Image (tube, helix red, strand yellow):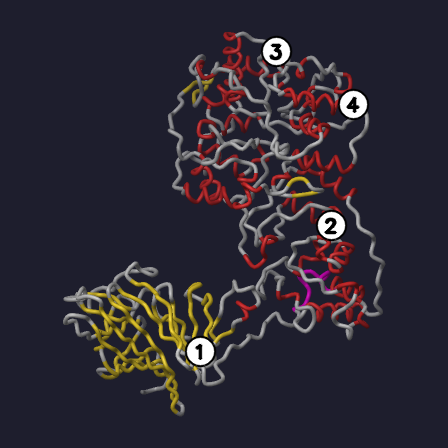
């Protein structure tokens, strides 16, 4: 007798004989109730998903059925208690399952014995888990929840905190179903356990599978199931599995001699599985409407059209959960929020899976195979992952799309010199042509404000006909596309290139992109920066995201070539530099979402925390504040006649007005900063008000300090400076002198210079 994790006879009899009052009919994810589906198509999907052709001869070979789960892996992954209760009453334990109750002809005592024998048989086949898998894990449930909501799990499954919306793969009871190691094993390679591919491979790293398991099983109480495998029961269970024709669905080899019942074409459609009575046949707990749909499909004498075959396949594999085609499918409204992007500049196309209209004419067969069977990523900006499916199961759907979808063929276009034509295409893709790099990545590198599909993948993915038709009229293929129409009405915007012949220009681009990763870089790969400068007597401003600062940066360029960025989030001077002001292309070329960058290689950056704090002693450790604290409140700014801002903010009861003005004297460049303080109470006493500038500062004189040999600070009035050494740097701290009698007030003036000495 083998010992391990198994069950004794009758241990879970109460669970095994659960009430059948809550039986539900099979739920097929692709047959969502909110969508209009023809009765015949619904019936055909049910026939395939319920595996009717596993037991009934399919003479027409029109109803292929996918293989059932692997017996040996089921025994390894599932908790023995769940396995037993599921075999006893599958529809009660997992409402909506497509697994039939095959023990309908047995009474309660006979059923219990049969379930016990089948359980021992399945557990006797269990393969040991890999040594790397165990039931203990430090994986984060929060990380798993985030993965579940972003990579695409919610397209088919209910999140644990959602009500059941009628999807096939409800996660109710998952805690009782899997061991942690078993669930990790399943998630890493679901096609091994379920070769039908209804649960596809989501390309999970080991740590991701652990995190998902932690999220899905976080509420499970781990109770050891100490049981013994009885080999006599196991042998009896194996015989019972053969007698019940379990191997028809759960085949272990492809050369087994299977006994098939009457053919699908000759069935009496009011009896057996399609009746509402119990007997020596599988009970699927079908609803009346499902029986009707199956009967309609089986009675039909005509072959499904190619278009209907595609719809059946898309509903079988639940492609409709993410993709739209021919007016059906697509992300439902209640799931839309979970589809996210890494590039907001791409809009809806950057986060929602593409339409599959005409996809068989759009993509090359080799690329479709790479997507379906290898998980080739063409849209890395989408957080939702395209899963990998089982080759033998999806190949028919793929072939049907390729054979059905078509476009008018584009005539061949010849050039006397192909290399010159490719060169023309390279110029067209560059900054002096159509500026394709503004939106498309190039060999994995994002050049412009967007990161749309890589130019080097175009000819690998697309058919030549589709490429031409799409460039000629992108909005007729995708009404919401951001792709501009460069050749409206067939007219070229560049009449000097190839005689203005739009077809030749498109072909030149096709020849250029056909070089794949060997294609040469077009002009603009190394983009020249734009320049926003303060050329006159007035300051210029740009409120946008800045590197290391965030979206509430306020950049100011002053006449004379001195500049700063004020951080309105943390309420601080964040950056200062001399020279030219800002490259705004990241903002102006991305509909306001990008980042503005200083036109300086080495701007002086200050710490992220607030630069003013109350302290008992100037030498005390600086309060740790990662972003704006509740004591610091930015109130806006006022502009003077030269459009120079005075920043206004509060610190506790203290009102602060912070004004910068340029100092330009010969070769000397700098900014004079005047801070005026006005207290609304005496809460500052006996604390000291301190300003800080972090970095590796050096003290030159009592009121003169420098950093990096570039920036000098001279205290003109209202404060006393000192260097405070920390574990990593030498900070400049300034004790601000205030008159705190009655109403705290005061002023501090300091000069920032970009010369060797002020």
- Label 3, label 2: how far apart the Cα atoms are: 50 Å
Q: Nearer the viewer, mark 3 or mark 1?
A: 1
Q: Nearer the viewer, mark 4 or mark 1?
A: 1
Say what secondary structure mark 3 lies in: loop
**Of pointers 3 and 4, the one earlier in the residue sequence:** 4
In percent of width and height, residue 181 lies at 45, 34
Q: Which mark is residue 59?
A: 4
In percent of width and height, residue 585 lies at 55, 70
Q: Nearer the viewer, mark 3 or mark 4?
A: 3
Q: Residues within 10 Å of mark 1 (few under 14, many from 20)?
A: many
Q: Nearer the viewer, mark 3 or mark 2?
A: 3
What residue is rendered at 30% in x and 63% in y?
632
Q: Which mark is residue 124?
A: none
In the image, is 468 to the left or to the right of 617?
A: right
What residue is rendered at 45% in x and 36% in y?
161
What residue is rendered at 38% in x and 83% in y?
662
Write down the residue under mark 1. Answer: 557
In percent of width and height, residue 139 lies at 41, 42
Write down the residue under mark 2. Answer: 364
- Label 2, label 1: how far apart the Cα atoms are: 52 Å
Q: In which quadrant is the C terminus drawn?
A: bottom left
Is the residue 722 above or below the residue 295 in the image? below
Magenta includes 241?
no
**Of pointers 4 and 2, the one earlier in the residue sequence:** 4
In the image, is 114 to the left or to the right of 554?
A: right
**Of pointers 3 and 1, the one earlier in the residue sequence:** 3
What residue is rendered at 49% in x and 84% in y?
535
- Label 4, label 2: how far apart the Cα atoms are: 33 Å
Q: Quadrant of residue 404?
A: top right
User: What residue range appears in magenta?
Assistant: 512-521
Write down the residue under mark 3. Answer: 278
């Amino acid at each position: 007798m083998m010992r391990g994790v198994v069950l004794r006879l009758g241990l879970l009899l109460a669970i095994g004989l659960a009430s059948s009052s809550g039986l539900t009919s099979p739920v097929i994810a692709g047959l969502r109730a909110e969508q209009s589906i023809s009765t015949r198509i619904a019936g055909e999907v049910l026939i395939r998903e319920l595996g009717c052709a596993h037991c009934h001869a399919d003479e027409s070979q029109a109803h292929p059925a996918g293989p059932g789960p692997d017996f040996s892996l089921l025994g390894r992954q599932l908790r023995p208690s769940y396995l037993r209760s599921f075999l006893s009453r599958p529809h009660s334990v997992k409402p909506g399952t497509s697994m039939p109750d095959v023990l309908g002809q047995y009474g309660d005592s006979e059923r219990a014995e049969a379930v016990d024998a089948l359980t021992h048989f399945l557990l006797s086949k269990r393969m040991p888990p890999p040594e790397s898998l165990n039931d203990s894990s430090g994986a984060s449930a929060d990380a798993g929840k985030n993965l579940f909501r972003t990579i695409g799990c919610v397209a088919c499954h209910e999140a644990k905190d959602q009500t059941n919306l009628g999807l096939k793969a409800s996660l109710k009871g998952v805690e009782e179903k899997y061991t942690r190691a078993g669930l990790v094993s399943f998630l890493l390679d679901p096609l091994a356990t379920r070769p039908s591919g209804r649960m596809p491979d989501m390309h999970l790293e080991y740590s991701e599978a652990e995190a998902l398991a932690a999220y899905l099983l976080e509420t499970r109480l781990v109770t050891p199931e100490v049981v013994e495998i009885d080999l006599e029961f196991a042998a009896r269970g194996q015989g019972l599995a053969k007698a019940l024709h379990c191997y028809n669905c759960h085949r272990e080899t492809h050369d087994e001699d299977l006994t098939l019942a009457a053919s699908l074409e000759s069935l009496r459609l009011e009896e057996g599985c399609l009746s509402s009575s119990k007997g020596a046949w599988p009970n699927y707990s079908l609803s009346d409407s499902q029986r009707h749909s199956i009967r309609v499909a089986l009675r039909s004498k005509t072959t499904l059209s190619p278009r209907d075959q595609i719809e059946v396949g898309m509903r079988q594999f639940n492609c409709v959960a993410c993709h739209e085609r021919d007016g059906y499918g697509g992300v439902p409204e209640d799931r839309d929020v979970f589809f996210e992007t890494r590039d907001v500049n791409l809009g809806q196309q950057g986060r929602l899976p593409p339409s599959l209209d005409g996809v068989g004419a759009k993509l090359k067969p080799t690329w479709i195979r790479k997507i379906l069977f290898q998980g080739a990523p063409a849209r890395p900006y989408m957080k939702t992952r395209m899963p990998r499916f089982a080759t033998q199961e999806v190949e028919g759907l793929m072939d049907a799309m390729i054979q059905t979808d078509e476009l008018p063929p584009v005539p061949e276009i010849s050039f006397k010199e192909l290399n010159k034509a490719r060169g023309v295409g390279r110029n067209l893709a560059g900054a002096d042509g159509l500026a394709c790099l503004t939106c498309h990545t190039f060999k994995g590198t994002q050049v412009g404000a967007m990161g749309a599909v890589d130019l080097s993948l175009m000819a690998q993915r697309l058919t030549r006909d589709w490429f031409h038709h799409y460039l000629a009229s992108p909005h007729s293929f995708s009404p919401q596309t951001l792709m501009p129409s460069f050749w409206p009405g067939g007219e070229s915007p560049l009449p000097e290139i190839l005689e203005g012949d739009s077809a030749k220009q498109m072909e030149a681009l096709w020849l250029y992109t056909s070089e794949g990763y060997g294609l040469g870089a077009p002009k603009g790969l190394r983009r020249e920066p734009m320049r926003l400068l303060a050329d006159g007597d007035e300051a210029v401003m740009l409120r946008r995201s800045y590197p290391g600062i965030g979206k509430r940066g306020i950049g100011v360029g002053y006449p004379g070539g001195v500049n700063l960025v004020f951080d309105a989030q943390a309420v601080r001077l964040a950056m200062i530099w001399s020279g030219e002001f800002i490259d705004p292309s990241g903002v102006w070329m991305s509909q306001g979402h990008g980042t503005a960058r200083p036109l300086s290689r080495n701007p002086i950056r200050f710490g992220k925390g607030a630069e003013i704090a109350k302290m008992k002693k100037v030498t005390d450790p600086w309060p740790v504040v990662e972003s704006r604290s509740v004591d610091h409140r930015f109130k806006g700014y006022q502009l003077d006649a030269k459009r120079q801002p005075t920043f206004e903010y509060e610190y506790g009861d203290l009102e602060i007005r912070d004004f910068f003005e340029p100092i330009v004297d010969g070769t000397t460049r700098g900014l004079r900063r005047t801070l005026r303080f006005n207290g609304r109470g005496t809460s500052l006493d006996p604390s000291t008000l301190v300003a800080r500038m972090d970095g590796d500062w050096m003290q030159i004189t009592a009121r003169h300090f420098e950093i990096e040999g570039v920036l000098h600070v001279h205290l003109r009035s209202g404060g006393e400076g000192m260097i405070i050494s920390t574990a990593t740097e030498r900070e400049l701290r300034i004790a601000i002198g205030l008159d705190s009698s009655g109403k705290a007030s005061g002023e501090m003036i300091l000069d920032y210079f970009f010369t060797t000495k002020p």
